[in-house]
Image (cartoon, rainbow, N blue to C red):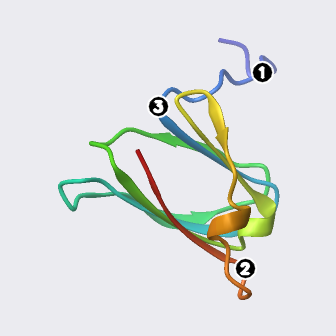
């Protein structure tokens, strides 16, 4: 593959994209932490796990989430501190 070729979208049921630094943690139904780290601006990660997935996002305003190809609205799950806590089924 060429170094100049665009990267393919990551595979995975849950995709998280950060337009600025954002901390993300995803825990699946079994209690397995499938993701727990700081995403950098422009970074997209994809994870799979046994649903429902418990998701916690710091700096939710700059983070986009999709599950099985559909966007997830973080608004209702976001606190005044800009932290989103939600369960995705």
Return the mark for residue 82. Answer: 2
Neighbor class of circle 3 (other Cα within 10 Å; few <14, some 14-19, many 20+) is some
Tell me whether circle 2 and circle 3 mark residues in contact (CB < 8 Å).
no
Question: Residue at horizontal 27%, vertical 42%?
Answer: 50
Q: Please rate how many residues cluster around mark 1, counting C-alpha atoms within 10 Å: few if below 14, some from 14 to 19, many from 20.
A: few
Residue 64: horizontal and vertical position, in percent? 72, 50
Residue 44 lies, with reference to residue 69, above or below; the image says: below
Along the line of sight, the residue nearer the viewer: 77 or 29:
77
Q: Secondary structure at mark 1?
A: loop
Q: Is residue 50 visible?
A: yes
**Camera-nearest residue between 70 and 62:** 70
Residue at the (67%, 81%) spot, across then down: 79
**Residue most toward the left?**
30
Contact? badges 1 and 2 (CB < 8 Å)? no
Report crowding for label 2: few under 14, some 14 to 19, many 20 or more residues within 10 A (C-alpha).
some
- Whichever of labels 3 and 1 marks the residue nearer the N terminus, that label is 1
Q: Which mark is residue 68?
A: none
Write the residue at 57% across / 29% down.
10
Left or right: 87 in relation to 79: left
What's the mark number on residue 6? 1
Quadrant in which the C terminus appears: top left
Residue 28 coordinates in the image, percent (x, y): 30, 53
Under circle 2, the secondary element is loop
Q: Which residue is mark 3?
A: 12
Q: Of discs 3 and 1, which sits in the foreground?
A: 3
In which quarter of the view is residue 66 placed? top right
Q: Nearer the viewer, residue 2 or 66?
A: 66
Kind of element beneath mark 3: loop
Residue at point 52%, 29% (across, down): 68
- The residue furthest bottom is 81
């Amino acid at each position: 593959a060429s170094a100049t070729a665009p990267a393919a979208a990551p595979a995975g049921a849950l995709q998280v994209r950060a337009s600025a630094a954002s901390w993300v943690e995803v825990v699946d139904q079994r209690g397995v932490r499938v993701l727990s780290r700081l995403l950098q601006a422009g970074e997209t990660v994809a994870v799979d796990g046994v649903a429902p997935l418990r998701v916690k996002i710091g700096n939710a305003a700059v983070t986009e989430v999709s599950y099985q190809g559909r966007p997830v609205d973080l608004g209702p799950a976001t606190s005044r501190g800009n932290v989103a806590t939600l369960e995705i089924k």
